[in-house]
Amino acid sequence: MDASPTPEQEELRAQARAFLEATPEPTWGALAELGWTGVGVAEELGGAGLGFLEQAVLHEELGRALTPGPFYGTVAVSLPALPADDQAAVAAGEASWALALGPLVPDLDSVTNVAVAGGDGVYELVRFERELLATHDATRPLGVVVGGEAGRRLCSTEVLPEIRRRSLTALALEACGVGARALELAVSYVGEREQFGRPIGSYQAVAHPLATTFMELELARSLALGAAWAISVGDGRAGLLAAAAKAQAGEAAVAACERSIQAHGGIGFTWEHPLQRLIKRALWIRSWEASTSALRAEIATRLIDEGGW
Amino acid sequence: MDLRDTPEEAAFRSTVRDWLATNVPDELRGYGFGVHTDDLTALRAWSASLHAAGYAGLTWPAEYGGAGATLAHQAIFLEEAALAEAPPHVGVIGLGMAGPTIITHGTPEQKARYLAPILSADEIWCQGFSEPDAGSDLAGVRASARREGDRFVVDGQKVWSSYAHVADHCILLTRSDPSSRRHEGLTYLILDMHAPGVEVRPLRQLTGDAEFNEIFLSGVEVPVASVLGEVGGGWQVAMTTLLHERGTLGIALVSRLELALRKLVSLARDRGATTLQRDAIAREWVELEGLRLTAYRSLSALARTGVPGPEGSILKLQWSEANQRVTALALDLLGPDALLAAGNAPYGGWWQQQQLRSRGNTIEAGTSEILRSIVAERVLGLPRSR
């Protein structure tokens, strides 16, 4: 048993963080040049041929940086449904995808292609119009497709459980990044801001909720990494762990943003402060795919009714 | 990262599981987590059989009678023992605290004298750190050790001491320099609990059990040869003890929580659960898996760096609050039957007893308030609150 990241994974994280700090809004082509869009694509298709644990590092760092663009929807959600040529196009930065699993479709402002599940297959959607909807999180727009019809068959729907595991885990990892950033901002602020002649972080009423936040995020991160590992080796518990990770991380990230706003006082409540963007992404993640209570209901069914553990 | 047992670890787990299945005495299985004097003979026999099988002091170096095993092996043993509802070795204080401290700071004579009987359960240890006026603020210790020739004369009072009523030795933190303050002037002694002037009185806790004791010390003579570490250097030695207290504690706590949650799920199956109760059960399962994976990360970091991270504090704090919620949830599932105790109650009153006992979890081994301050100041780097 070894629950530590490899030196290569740590190096990838350091590189990703440095790049995203220098380049807050990278183009899809720039991510392709870094090898990120093809992180899990086989080397013979022009990808990096890495595992889901390496992909996990990128989801967490992209979440932390609130990087806009279709990385989550393309790499975590759509890619497992794509034939080899389309995977190669993603790796090359020539294509990006959204998979419409319900009426709301993410990143519809930027993706080159849209897939849709119907019957026993996943198909490319053709001859449709895009309509963007008003939402709060500007970094991850939502839209609906109008009209359209099924084009090429991409794969069987048998891939959908695997897609769901990857989607939930990627969301959990993003949430860990968002929450960690919100906590860092709070820690930095309360260490400097003085009232009554002392830094406000020296008051336990201010400090202890931040300690709680750290612990909730650590649990979330452990679950998200555990789910990512289970996916990477095809472990049978991957689905259950992914649901657990998304439930914990979605809640922990929202709570981290809420407590960070509270710790900042008025300044944290302003439009100019980065926290308004962080909490909107955290709320996006918490509600997307399945809400916390829906995930817990699934877990309860598995534990209590189906005797799964 | 690979969360699976290595083939070698899997073989060890299988051996441990088989051994526990046939060797835990029926009268001790599901015994719970406290110590009761009337079970002492059986617990000593159980501990001796653990020792004979090589499972006592797994991580102790072989030269001191341990198995020299990895932390992963220790974790596997703790997981399997919890799921088998096996009682712990009666020498938990000796194995987890006194022994490792003696291995780190002891003289060759102290190592030769004290270590082997810990493993075999021939001698039981207790801890004399807390005092009525030195709880969370351990540096406020006042029990005095006055040097007289080749001995110290000890006077004072210790409290919340598990196993003191049956212990042969005590790791005792004293103030040897009466003019000193706080962390200076403390001396760490090995106290013979059978020496004249040592009086132990049980502390009956709100569950009705008496797991803890007060120790009264009047004019107790302790030879200078029983100083552990340097005279006046007791604080550093005490920190070694506390570090070990939280070493693999996380795995043990997580394993206990898993056992409780498995029982909770079968309770929900037996008696039915509302939608809200089902939601709460799922929430606790998520918490449990998060704690387990955090414990694994912590163990891997410890194995790699040799330095325990802050996870020990995090795990203890989160476990204690989770255990309180899980036992409260069980009472909710039991409805009015939650009011019954012992033989009248479903499952022998285990849940009612556990709910009451869990109130101590957020106090013992570091209160939740102290642990949150540790996380805030030492992990997050926030300004000190005092």
Image (tube, coloured by chain):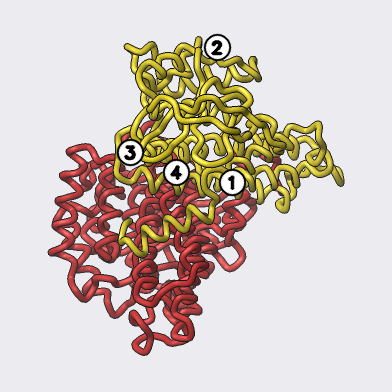
Which residue is labeled 1 in the image? A287
Tell me which numbered mark, 3 or 4, is placed earlier along the sequence: 3
Residue that lies at the very extreme toward the bottom in this rendered image: B344
Marks 3,4: beta carbons within 8 A: no
Asked which secondary structure carries label 4, the reply is helix
Which residue is labeled 4 in the image? A223
A56 left or right of B78 in image: right
- Palette colour of chain A: yellow
What distance separates the C-alpha of mark 2 from that of mark 3? 31 Å
Asked which secondary structure carries label 1, the reply is helix
Q: Is residue B7 above or below residue A28?
A: below
What distance separates the C-alpha of mark 4 from that of mark 2? 31 Å
B3 left or right of B152 in image: left
- Observer-nearest of A288 and A3: A288
Q: Is residue B151 above or below residue B34?
A: above
Q: Are marks 2 and 3 on the same chain?
A: yes
- Tell me the crowding category of disc 2: few under 14, some 14 to 19, or many 20 or more residues within 10 angstroms, Cα based: some
Q: Are marks 1 and 3 on the same chain?
A: yes
Tag 3: residue type?
Answer: Glu
Tell me which numbered mark, 4 or 1, is placed earlier along the sequence: 4
Of tags 4 and 2, the one toward the viewer is 2
Tell me which chain the residue with mark 2 is part of: A
Q: In which quarter of the image is the N terminus of chain A?
A: top left
Q: Is residue B145 above or below residue B205?
A: above
Which residue is labeled 3 in the image? A158
Asked which secondary structure carries label 3, the reply is helix
Marks 4,1: beta carbons within 8 A: no
